[in-house]
Image: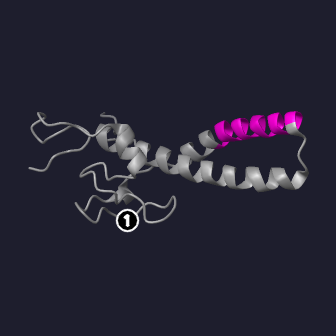
Amino acid sequence: MADDPLTGSADGSGPALPLVRLSLGGRCPRCGSPTLFAGMTRFAARCSHCGLDFSSFNVGDGPAAFLTLILGTVIVAAAITLELTVHPPLWVHAVVWLPVTLAAVIGSLRIAKAALIAVEYRQAAHEGRIAPRGP
């Protein structure tokens, strides 16, 4: 049986890849191959190495909303600090903060989405269903 990168080998005795390593590398939660993403932040349909179907996972918009608030706060604070200490022209702010914001959003979104998929896989999470009640 194949090793599971989150829990170790199939019998539980082997080493496990840490969640951080899986999410930073955009790795498949089952086999550990770097096949999770087909684009910058778009998931591949399935792992080309082990065949795990990534479309069955649902990370939703949680990472995007959470990261928008955090990164927005950090970047606005840094821009205000730069303005109050150096007083650069407006074009300098555009040249500095637009690429920094874009890189930070894309990089952190990839990491957050990969981490959520790995946790969903580890916990065998699936969409909630209400069981029918008996008579």
Residue at image location 54% in from the left, 46% down from the top: 108
Image quadrant holding the C terminus, namely: top left
Magenta stretch, main secondary structure class: helix
Residue 38 sits above or below residue 104 on the image: below
Q: Position of residue 40 (x, y in %)?
A: 51, 61
**Tag 1's secondary structure?**
loop
- In the rendered structure, the answer to whether residue 93 lies left or right of residue 129 reads right
Residue at the location (75% across, 37% down)? Answer: 78
Q: Is residue 79 magenta?
A: yes
Please say which color scheme the image uses. one colour
Q: So how many labels did they put on this image? A: 1
Query: In screen coordinates, is 50 left or right of 114?
Result: left
Is residue 106 positioned above or below 77 on the image?
below
Instruction: Tell me the magenta residue range.
Output: 68-85
- In which image quadrant can residue 45 be found? bottom left
Mark 1 neighbour density, 10 Å: few (under 14) some (14–19) many (20 or more): some
- Residue sitting at x 13%, y 50%: 2
Report whether residue 40 is seen.
Answer: yes
Q: Amino acid at mark 1?
A: Ala
**Is residue 134 shown in magenta?**
no
| Residue 117: x %, y % from top left | 39, 47
User: Does 62 sit above or below residue 56?
Assistant: above
Q: Is residue 130 visible?
A: no
Dot 1 corresponds to which residue? 45
Q: Is residue 123 left or right of residue 69?
A: left
Say which quarter of the image contains residue 98: bottom right
Q: Residue at x 87, y 38 (%)?
A: 86
Q: Position of residue 1 (x, y in %)?
A: 8, 50
Residue at the limit of the structure toward the front, as seen here: 86
Give the left or right position of residue 101, taking residue 113 as reference: right
Q: Position of residue 72 (x, y in %)?
A: 71, 41
